[in-house]
Amino acid sequence: MTELVQKDSAKVASILETFNTEDRIVNGDPQSWETARFSSMPVSACITLLTKIQTDLRYTESEVVGYLKNQVDASDFRVNKITAAVIPVSSYVNRGDTYKARIILAAVDSTKRPKITVNGQVLEGEDYEVACPSTGSFDFSGVIELPRGDGSIQPYEFASSYIVGEPTAIISADMMNVFYAGIQNPISASVPGVPAQNISLNITNADVTRTGKGWSVKPRKVGTPCVVSVSAKMADGKVQSIGRKEFRVKALPDPVAYISYKAEGREQKYKGQGKPIAKGNLISAPGIRAELPDADLDVRYRVVGYALTFFDSMGNSMEQVSNSAEFTPAQKQTIQRMTKGKKFFISRIKAVGPDGITRTLTAIDVTVN
């Protein structure tokens, strides 16, 4: 039995003391264990002593069996808490890539905190934090030491790495690479790994309004660039300046005037340039319109007036003015009297854009067919 409990010195000592059968010295004379215990003792007393020895044996056997039973799982780990854990391969995924993560159940013993050492430094808790002042790839390793139920320590080694990149902001004007003064210019800004609601813009020489798809920028002054600065609220709650980009500010270009009329079931645009136009189309035309030749800019212009110049039979020029975009009744009567091949000019065309500036457009030379 002492061999079975040899790891427990207290139990070994107790067993050896209980069942000590070594010779004794009694009154100066050496005596055997049997003589010392049973000499000159009545039979009934001897039977009582032998019964006690039997009882001690059975009790000790029971203690040894209990000890062995406890040692079966003495080195096992006990847990009192099970939690769900998500371990992503990466918390940042590019569009088109695949997000991967391990979803596991983690069993822990909240009464026994493991000792975690990373790169030789013992952590105070379970969170590993390290400053990232420079970019590049960094490795780290360590060991988790978990105490067993029998007092021994079970080590678990680990190693991992991480990459530190330069924070970048992606800033783009949704229409063109410049801002136009006096109108709302849509702009987009994003920071990889940062939600859109945590991104903010600061822009010089402009008024900024947040929209559902990004921001709208209205520059104040032509010729002074707008500097767009992007800040982001990072995962640790700190606001960090990410990047900046400069945009030129230009005035809206002048539109091109044309006569709008319908033919073949759709709108036609007559811009002169020496080409003739049917008198019927001129009579039915509502008036003068203006548009930008650049289809990338969705900007509307409104014609607010113009002058129609024609020549009488003596070659004298005469002028009829309209204070709107429409042909006046007098102008339509003049056009109605014109014969094939006659010419007139639509000049001093005034148009107003969304920036509120009134522009004088290039004249339209009209040849009646």
Image (tube, rainbow, N blue to C red):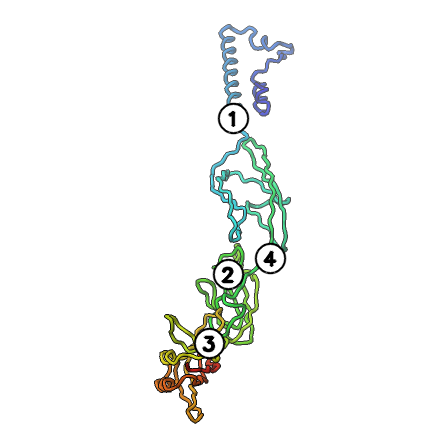
Q: Is residue 147 above or below residue 259?
A: above
Residue with the mark numbered 2: 199
Q: Secondary structure at mark 1?
A: helix
The residue under label 1 is which amino acid type? Answer: Asn
- 263 left or right of 76 in image: left
Residue 77 position in % (x across, y down): 52, 33
- What residue is disc 1 on? 70
Seen at 61% across and 47% down, the residue is: 161
In the rendered structure, which disc, 3 or 2, sits on the residue that comes first in sequence? 2
Question: Which residue occupies the extreme front position in the image?
Answer: 340
Q: Nearer the viewer, mark 1 or mark 3?
A: 3
Residue with the mark numbered 4: 166
Q: In the rendered view of the protein, which quadrant contains the N terminus?
A: top right
- Residue identifier under label 3: 355
Residue type, label 2: Ile
Gap in Å between the C-alphas at discs 4 and 1?
57 Å
* Residues at marks 1 and 2, CA–CA distance in whole angstroms: 60 Å
Q: For the residue labelled by badge 3, is the local secondary structure a helix, a strand or a loop?
A: loop
Circle nearer the viewer, 3 or 2 = 3
Residue 285 horizontal/vertical position (percent): 37, 78
Which mark sits nearer the N-terminus, 4 or 1?
A: 1
Callout 4 amino acid: Glu
Q: Disc 4 or 2, which lies upstream in sequence? A: 4
Q: Are marks 1 and 3 in contact (CB under 8 Å)?
A: no
Query: Looking at the image, is mark 3 or mark 4 nearer the viewer?
Result: 3
Asked whether the beta carbons under mark 3 and mark 2 sit within 8 Å of each other, the answer is: no
